[in-house]
Amino acid sequence: MKNITRAVVIVLLAVACVHVPVAIAAAQPPKQAETYVPIDQLPPQDQLPAAPLLVGAYVFVPVVLFLYVLSVARRMTAVQREMERLEADIKRSGRT
Amino acid sequence: MPKWFMPACIVCAVMFAATPIVIANAPFESTMGLVFKIFFYHMPSAWMFLLSGVLCGIASVRYLASGDARHDRTAWAAAELAVVFGLLTLVTGPLWARKAWGTWWVWDVRVTSSLVSWMVAVAYLILRRYGGPGSDKLAAGLALFGAANVPFIYISVNYWRTIHPATSVVPTLPVDMGLPLWFCVVAFLLLFILLLKLRVRLEEQRSRLDTIYLSANH
């Protein structure tokens, strides 16, 4: 239990080490605006339509989830086949 | 699999099929417009990501304390789900940010700590896959990193200067925006439970296979 407490303390210290520089970086103020730019004068890359981003997000999520379910199903099938093969081998070797 | 699994799968599939309709009927946010609707998938993914991290940490602590392999299997399953839901969070977030913030990525404390937590989950899986004997305990120690990071991720937006929305946004949502959000959260939570059950089942089968191998060799 003492070891676990020590491990938890070390983990918390390590997490703090990661977060302190990040917090310092995040505390920097954003670049100050020098001129006023109307929205219609923005460069084309900043006048992005929202639809492709929205569609991208709503396609990406189901695709990733489907691939993950497929991956788990394939792994389960492989384990099942291996079990059946092994059980058949044990039965066969028991007979001989 | 338990009796509730298949009905729960059907309910989950119906809920996910209904989410585009529910989200389409939600009102537009005043400044972000259409792109705000990514929020309805981004936030539930992020919550499931954090939940996976916490679950992996708790199961790992219990495994280290008791040595019970069931907790190890739960931790492994939760780590894999942390990678999946973390990936969804870290991809849908920048898609939203590109329009809302004008940039794909900012190295602010919320986004960076989420990335760190996702990398810890990936490291956990790599360790389990290639670590060899004893990697279960090492990985359990690593899982504490991920779990300890979760409170930092959650509260970071309230304590550090960041452009990421604060945690106070969700409680202040109007009902016609809040209901679709909670509908999506329930759908994602149900999916999380089903995937966790499925993944734990895979580990149980692998464990059974190991037992058969051992009994065959003796």
Image (cartoon, coloured by chain):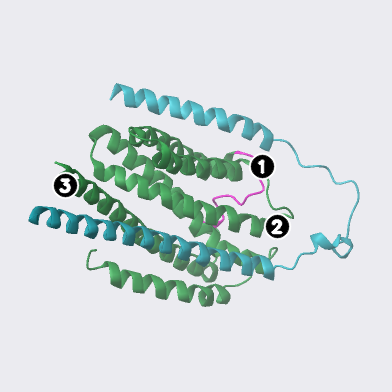
Residue drawn where x is 56% and y is 64% of the image: A60
Callout 3 crowding tier (Cα within 10 Å): few <14, some 14–19, many ≥20: few
Q: Please, what is the three-letter code of the amino acid marked with disc 2? A: Arg
Same chain? Circles 2 and 1: yes
* SS of the residue under disc 3: helix
In the image, taking residue B56 as reference, residue B152 lies left or right, namely right
For chain B, what colour was chosen? Answer: green
Residue corresponding to mark 3? B216
Which chain is indicated by disc 2?
B
* Distance between the alpha carbons at the discs numbered 2 and 1: 14 Å
- Which stretch did the figure color magenta? B160-170
Instruction: Return the x and y of residue B34 as percentages of the image width and height.
Output: 66, 69
Q: Quadrant of residue B214?
A: top left
Q: Residue B122, can we see it? A: yes
Residue corresponding to mark 2? B98
In the image, taking residue B132 as reference, residue A23 lies left or right, namely right
Residue B107's label in the rendered image is 1
